[in-house]
Image (cartoon, rainbow, N blue to C red):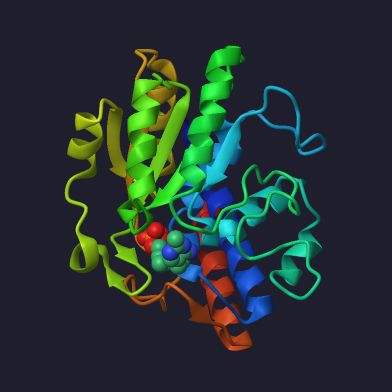
Amino acid sequence: MNAEEKIRLQQFAIDIRKQIIREMGSLGAGHLGGNLSIADIVAVLYGSEMKYDPADPKMKDRDILICSKGHAGPCLYGALALKGFIPMERLDTLNRGGTELPSHCDRLHVPGIEMTTGSLGQGFSAACGMALAAHLDEDGRTVYCIIGDGESQEGQIWEAVLFAAQQKLDNLILFVDYNKAQLDGWTRDICDMGDYVDKFHAFGWHTAEIDGHDVEAIKTAVDAAKADHTGRPHVIVCNTIKGYGVSFTKPNACHHVNFTPELVEQCQKELDAARAALTAK
Ligand SMILES: Cc1ncc(C[n+]2csc(CCOP(=O)(O)OP(=O)(O)O)c2C)c(N)n1
């Protein structure tokens, strides 16, 4: 990846983080930590990897992204607004009465959202079904899915992992947002998942483990997964930090955060400074 492309994707990730703060700031609260932790993954997907058309969200042969950890809707909404799927002003209506922007991913209200999620464990099964359909149609589509590490404690996830391997879904790329924290503390203290790479490897998957905040590493891993047509589904285990990008967050205590206007201003200033530092490089 050349330097300009890297800066462009890093800036896009910061712009997505700014929209997450905007959305939750206007509501006064939100699932901050797990939204910020996936912003770099979402930036690479919408900024470089996915086939889509904001003017035609249901475009035939588009790629699919399902955020199975549905509480990270605001992150996807930020990317979708920046790419022109929805008006930017709609971001100020997150989860208000009558809104078209419910806080959890909602495919019936939000153009570009492919699956309604929020009940953890379920979105990934839908992603496997869509990947199977694309596989049977041989239409060249890639199906991406993001799950949380806390979410991976759901039994349904591992049924789907088995199914994807059995069906040889090599058009399926799964990201594990390995931020090491769930709703109420560290994942290792609640239900330790052990080594994801070993686990997925044992289930017959093609695996990679990367820094999930490094846009270059994310793109390299996705490109390698797309180039591997050996009949194995792909998992990219992304080491991330819950609440990444702003300074006030503590990784194991920022699942859901209340915002004051002052806190919103502080976060936006920090993100603007990080963006300016990139431009200055
Ligand atoms: C089936 C189900 N049980 C419980 C919840 C409540 N819940 C929402 S987010 C969350 C924690 C999920 O942890 P993780 O997947 O690690 O998400 P992240 O830390 O990345 O935000 C829980 C328990 C839910 N949405 N669905």
Residue 156 percent coordinates (x, y) = 38, 46
Q: Is residue 245 visible?
A: no
Establish if 151 lies above or below 162: below
- Judge left or right: residue 137 versus residue 163: right
Residue 172 percent coordinates (x, y) = 46, 28
Q: Nearer the viewer, residue 24 or 7?
A: 24
- Judge left or right: residue 280 versus residue 244: right
Q: Residue at x 17, y 37 (%)?
A: 198
Establish if 150 lies above or below 270: above
- Judge left or right: residue 275 versus residue 114: left
Occupied quadrant, residue 49: top right
Establish if 82 lies above or below 231: below
Q: Nearer the viewer, residue 178 or 100?
A: 100
Residue 110 percent coordinates (x, y) = 73, 52
Quadrant in which the N terminus appears = top left
Q: Is residue 134 visible?
A: yes
Q: Residue at x 39, y 28 (%)?
A: 164
Q: Residue at x 34, y 59 (%)?
A: 150
Establish if 209 lies above or below 244: above
